């Protein structure tokens, strides 16, 4: 039986309303801090889409007031499930902005687990948004995704493998320095800016690197701000982003191979 829910979050951002609007209401902006590859048709009734790991989710834009309000919602499923999202922007003195994010809708029979996942996930995503507008303002991020199933592997074992690969202790504190040589990838040199035992986020000079291990799977959600985000060339063989994603997938699979 569907179960209604609503989550609301508010945070102050060191960016003006125009910068925040660009981050939350355009495809390139959302690519730079949220999940997957995104596109937004800028009008009420337009389509907002997100593609992650080959799965495409589409929504309809229900509010589009540049610099003030952006909202969209998915179509109801046969069982009544749907998701609705709303962002409200308020400028403050000194060029800062307060953003209110509301996520509501109907969840399915296992609504409690879904609700808990959403409630714990949103603070992390909004933290990533703050990292983006604070440290990468004006730069476009390229999303990189990789996934490795680890069925039956104890969470502690998976966590230890990830943290060891990053040169960190098994329970690292936020603020720890990260210096790691990763096979087939450039060295990772930065700061651990989020650590909660399930999610780890590293900020470097050119990226936000997220390592997530819910039960049974490990996911990478990275946002890269280096030359991958430059304007595409005319060379049809130039797929630097795809090659980088393949390299991260190979690294993750090799790290956690049974």
Image (tube, grey):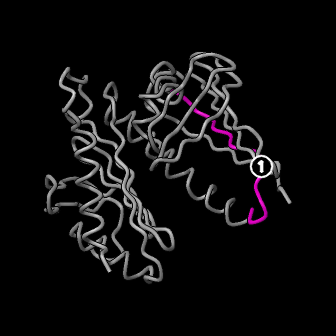
Q: Is residue 102 in the magenta section?
A: yes
Q: Is residue 101 above or below residue 26?
A: below
Q: At which x and y percent is residue 93? A: 51, 21
Q: Is residue 9 in the magenta section?
A: no
The N terminus, quarter of image:
bottom right
Q: Nearer the viewer, residue 236 or 241?
A: 236
Q: At which x and y percent is residue 148? A: 39, 66
Over which residues does the magenta segment extend? 97-111
Q: Nearer the viewer, residue 49 or 162?
A: 49
Q: Residue furthest front?
A: 236
Residue drawn at the location 49% of the way across and 25% of the way down: 26
Q: Is residue 120 above or below residue 153?
A: above
Q: Main secondary structure of the magenta part?
A: strand
Quarter holding residue 243:
top left
Q: At which x and y percent is residue 184? A: 14, 58
Q: Nearer the viewer, residue 23 or 27?
A: 27
Q: Residues within 10 Å of mark 1 (few under 14, many from 20)?
A: some
Residue drawn at the location 60% of the way across and 24% of the way down: 90
Q: Secondary structure at mark 1?
A: loop
Residue drawn at the location 54% of the way across and 51% of the way down: 123
Residue drawn at the location 63% of the way across and 21% of the way down: 46
Residue that numbered label 1 is attached to: 81
Residue 109 placement, left or right of 66? right
Q: At which x and y percent is residue 166? A: 24, 66
Q: Is residue 97 above or below residue 147?
A: above
């Amino acid at each position: 039986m569907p179960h209604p829910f609503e989550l609301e979050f508010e945070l102050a951002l060191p960016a003006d309303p125009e910068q925040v609007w660009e981050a939350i209401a355009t495809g390139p902006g959302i690519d730079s801090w949220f999940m997957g590859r995104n596109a937004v048709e800028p009008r009420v009734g337009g389509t907002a889409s997100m593609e992650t790991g080959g799965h495409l989710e589409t929504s309809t834009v229900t509010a589009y007031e540049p610099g003030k309000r952006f909202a969209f919602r998915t179509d109801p499923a046969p069982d009544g499930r749907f998701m609705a999202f709303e962002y409200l922007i308020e400028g403050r003195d000194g060029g800062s902005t307060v953003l209110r994010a509301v996520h509501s809708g109907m969840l399915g029979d296992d609504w409690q687990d879904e609700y808990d996942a959403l409630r714990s996930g949103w603070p992390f995503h909004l933290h990533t948004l703050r990292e983006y507008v604070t440290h990468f303002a004006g730069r476009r991020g390229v999303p990189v995704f990789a996934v490795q199933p680890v069925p039956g592997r104890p969470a502690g074992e998976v966590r230890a493998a990830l943290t060891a690969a990053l040169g960190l202790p098994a329970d690292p504190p936020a603020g720890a320095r990260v210096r790691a040589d990763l096979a087939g990838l450039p060295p990772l040199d930065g700061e651990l800016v989020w650590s909660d035992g399930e999610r780890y986020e590293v900020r470097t000079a050119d990226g936000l690197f997220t390592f997530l291990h819910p039960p049974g799977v490990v996911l990478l959600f990275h946002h890269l701000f280096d030359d991958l985000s430059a304007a595409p060339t005319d060379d049809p063989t130039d797929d630097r982003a795809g090659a980088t994603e393949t390299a991260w997938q190979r690294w993750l699979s090799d790290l956690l191979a049974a």
